[in-house]
C-alpha cells in the first residue's frame, strides 16, 4: 500500500491530494496539513465556489478545488442537493436564480452564512459582509417561491427559468460595510478551519523579515541550525490549553499558533503565563521568543521565553519613520494623521 500511494502521489499528485483530502474531509487539522503539503508541492488550492465546487474535493486543471461539504456546519446532504441542482439545470446565475432553485428545507440561515464566510458566493458578490447579512433575505425569498410553486401559482413573467432573469432585482441585500482584511480572514477561518485565501501575517511579512523573525517551516527545514537556540517567531493564536501540574500544582499552557507557512505548538511556563494570560486572545497575532527543541525527526517542541501582541512589539522597535514626498499636497493630510495617533520621530523629505 505504501508503494502504491507513493507511486500515485509521484505520478498523479493533484488527483492523489484531492482524494486524500476527501478521505479526511471532516478532520480540519488534517486538511490544514494537506494545505501545507499542497503549498510545498506548488499545487494551488482553489477556494470553495457555489458554481465550481463539488461536495468532495475535486481536480480542476492543475489545482484542487475546495469541497463544499468540508466547510463547518453546512451538512453533506445539503451540499449534494445544491450541486445536483446545478449539474441538472446549469450554473446559478445570481441570488435570485439560487433562491428560485434551492431546496429550502435542506438549507438554513447558518449554512448560508458559512458558505458566505468561506467565499462560496464571491462569484455573485465579493462583499462577504453584505452576503452574510442578506442570508435571511435570500432564504425568505426562496421560501416564498417554494410556497408559490406548491400552490401551483405561475409568475407574472410566465414562470420557468426566464422569471429569474426578469426578477433579478427583486432580491436586494442589506447595506453592509465590507469586512476589513483581518475580519474577512477571521470569518473565513471559522468557516473553513484554517486560513485559505491569505494569512493575517502576510501584510507584516517584510517587517517580520527585517526583524529576523523565523517561520516554523524554516525551523523545520533547518533543525540542526536552530535547535536549542533562541529564535523570534510570529503567530496568530488558534487555541490555548491551560493545565495544572499534578506534581507542583502550578499552571502552564500549550498554545497552538499559525504563521504563513504552517501551524506549530509551543509551551509556556507559570511565571510568563501569569504575566500575559489576559492578552492571550484567540485570533490575535503575537511576537514570540522561543527555544526550539528537536525531540525526534518528526516533532519540534517550542518553549516560549517571551510573548507580546504583535502590533505592540513592532511599534516598540520603530525608532524613526521617513516619508518621501514628490509634492506638497499630502502634507496637511499627513499632519492631521500624525496629530491623531502614533509616536516617535518623523522625517519628511
Image (tube, rainbow, N blue to C red):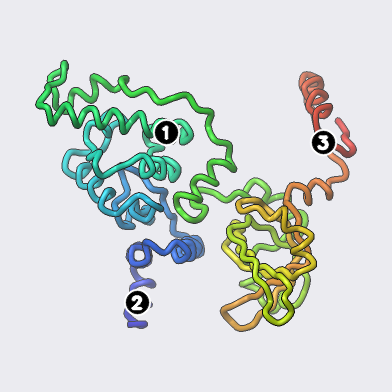
Q: Residue at x 12, y 21 (%)?
A: 154
Residue 45's x, y, as percent? 43, 54
Residue lying at the far top of the rendered structure? 156
Earlier in the chain: of badge 3 and badge 1, it is 1
Q: How many marks on residues?
A: 3
Q: Quadrant of residue 277?
A: bottom right
Residue 131's disc number: 1
| Residue for badge 2 | 5
Q: CA distance from mark 2 to mark 1?
A: 41 Å
Tags 2 and 1 touching, CB below 8 Å: no
- Compared with 290, 294 (above or below) is below
Residue 342's disc number: 3
Q: CA distance from mark 2 to mark 3?
A: 55 Å
Of 196 and 44, nearer the camera is: 196
Q: CA distance from mark 3 to mark 1?
A: 35 Å
- Compared with 35, 110 (above or below) is above
Q: Is residue 79 visible?
A: yes
Tag 2: Cα neighbours inside 10 Å, few (<14), some, or many (≥20)? few
Amino acid at each position: 500500500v505504501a508503494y502504491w500511494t507513493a507511486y500515485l502521489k509521484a505520478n498523479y499528485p493533484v488527483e492523489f491530494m484531492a482524494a486524500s483530502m476527501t478521505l479526511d474531509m471532516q478532520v480540519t487539522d488534517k486538511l490544514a496539513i494537506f494545505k501545507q503539503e499542497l503549498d510545498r508541492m506548488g499545487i494551488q488550492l482553489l477556494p470553495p465556489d457555489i458554481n465550481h465546487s463539488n461536495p468532495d474535493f475535486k481536480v480542476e486543471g492543475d489545482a484542487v478545488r475546495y469541497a463544499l461539504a468540508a466547510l463547518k456546519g453546512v451538512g453533506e446532504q445539503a451540499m449534494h442537493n445544491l450541486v445536483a441542482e446545478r449539474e441538472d439545470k446549469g450554473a446559478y446565475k445570481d441570488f435570485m436564480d439560487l433562491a428560485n432553485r434551492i431546496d429550502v428545507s435542506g438549507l438554513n440561515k447558518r449554512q448560508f452564512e458559512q458558505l458566505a464566510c468561506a467565499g462560496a458566493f464571491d462569484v455573485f458578490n465579493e462583499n462577504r459582509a453584505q452576503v452574510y447579512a442578506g442570508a435571511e433575505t435570500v432564504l425568505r425569498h426562496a421560501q416564498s417561491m417554494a410556497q408559490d410553486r406548491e400552490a401551483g401559482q405561475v409568475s407574472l413573467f410566465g414562470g420557468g427559468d426566464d422569471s429569474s432573469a426578469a426578477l433579478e432585482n427583486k432580491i436586494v441585500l442589506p447595506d453592509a460595510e465590507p469586512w476589513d482584511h483581518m475580519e474577512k480572514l477571521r470569518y473565513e477561518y471559522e468557516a473553513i478551519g484554517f486560513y485559505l485565501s491569505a494569512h493575517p501575517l502576510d501584510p507584516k511579512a517584510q517587517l517580520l523579515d527585517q526583524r529576523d523573525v523565523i517561520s516554523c517551516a524554516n525551523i523545520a527545514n533547518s533543525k540542526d541550525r536552530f535547535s536549542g537556540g533562541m529564535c523570534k517567531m510570529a503567530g496568530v493564536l488558534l487555541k490555548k490549553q491551560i493545565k495544572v501540574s499534578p506534581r507542583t500544582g502550578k499552571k502552564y499552557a500549550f498554545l497552538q499558533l499559525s504563521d504563513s507557512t504552517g501551524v506549530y505548538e509551543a509551551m509556556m511556563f507559570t511565571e510568563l503565563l501569569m504575566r500575559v494570560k489576559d492578552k492571550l486572545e484567540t485570533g490575535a497575532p503575537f511576537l514570540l521568543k522561543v527555544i526550539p527543541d528537536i525531540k525526534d525527526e518528526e516533532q519540534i517542541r517550542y518553549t516560549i521565553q517571551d510573548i507580546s501582541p504583535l502590533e505592540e512589539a513592532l511599534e516598540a522597535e520603530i525608532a524613526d519613520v521617513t516619508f518621501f514626498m514628490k509634492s506638497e499636497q499630502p502634507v496637511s493630510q499627513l499632519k492631521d494623521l500624525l496629530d491623531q495617533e502614533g509616536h516617535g520621530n518623523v522625517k519628511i523629505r
